[in-house]
Image (cartoon, rainbow, N blue to C red):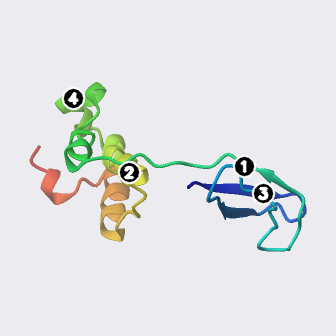
């Protein structure tokens, strides 16, 4: 029993439609403006992952395995930013400040000794 998305020709917004059977007639109406001129939209989909798969996917990119890569302040936080964006998580303000400071040449205290 899928949920389909339709785009309204009038207001251009999407409406979700729960379909019980494939033979059920699709009399779709926009839930925002009431329009009836609807076209089927391409929907996003999700892939379920196990905890193990999540952990395996969180390792550093192989092209950056050099110790020197992370000594360059311009690269500080690049991997963290990428991973947080992929997970849909907002960067904590404290982390954002440390990354920006490192890029300006002020290395965070924990990295001074590297």
- Image-quadrant location for residue 93: bottom left
Report which residue position mark 3 lands on.
26
Residue 14 position, x and y percent, is: 73, 61
> Mark 3 vs mark 1: which is more N-terminal?
3
Report which residue position mark 2 lands on.
81
**Secondary element at image label 3:** loop
Cα separation, mark 3 vs mark 1, equals 14 Å
Residue 20 position, x and y percent, is: 61, 59
- Quadrant in which the N terminus appears: bottom right
- Mark 1 is surrounded, within 10 Å at the Cα level, by few (under 14), some (14 to 19) or many (20 or more) other residues, namely some
Which numbered disc covers residue 65? Answer: 4
**Secondary element at image label 1:** loop
| Residue for point 22% across, 39% down | 56
Which numbered disc covers residue 83? Answer: none
Cα separation, mark 1 vs mark 2, equals 30 Å
> Mark 2 vs mark 4: which is more N-terminal?
4
> Mark 1 vs mark 2: which is more N-terminal?
1
- Image-quadrant location for residue 10: bottom right
Report which residue position mark 1 lands on.
41
Frontmost of labels 1 and 2 is: 1
Cα separation, mark 3 vs mark 2, equals 42 Å
Q: Is residue 21 left or right of residue 31?
A: left
Q: Residue furthest front?
A: 23
Q: Is residue 101 left or right of residue 28?
A: left
Cα separation, mark 3 vs mark 4, equals 53 Å
Q: Is residue 42 left or right of residue 48?
A: right
> Mark 3 vs mark 2: which is more N-terminal?
3
């Amino acid at each position: 029993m899928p949920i389909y998305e339709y785009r309204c020709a009038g207001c251009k917004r999407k409406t979700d439609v729960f379909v019980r059977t494939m033979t059920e007639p699709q009399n779709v109406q926009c839930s925002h403006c009431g329009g009836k001129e609807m076209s089927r939209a391409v929907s996003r989909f999700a892939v379920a992952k196990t905890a193990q798969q999540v952990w395996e996917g969180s390792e550093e990119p192989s092209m950056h395995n050099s110790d020197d890569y992370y000594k360059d302040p311009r690269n500080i936080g690049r991997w963290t930013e990428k991973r947080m964006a992929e997970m849909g998580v907002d960067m904590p303000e404290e982390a954002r400040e440390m990354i920006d400071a490192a890029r300006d040449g002020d290395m965070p205290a924990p990295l001074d000794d590297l």
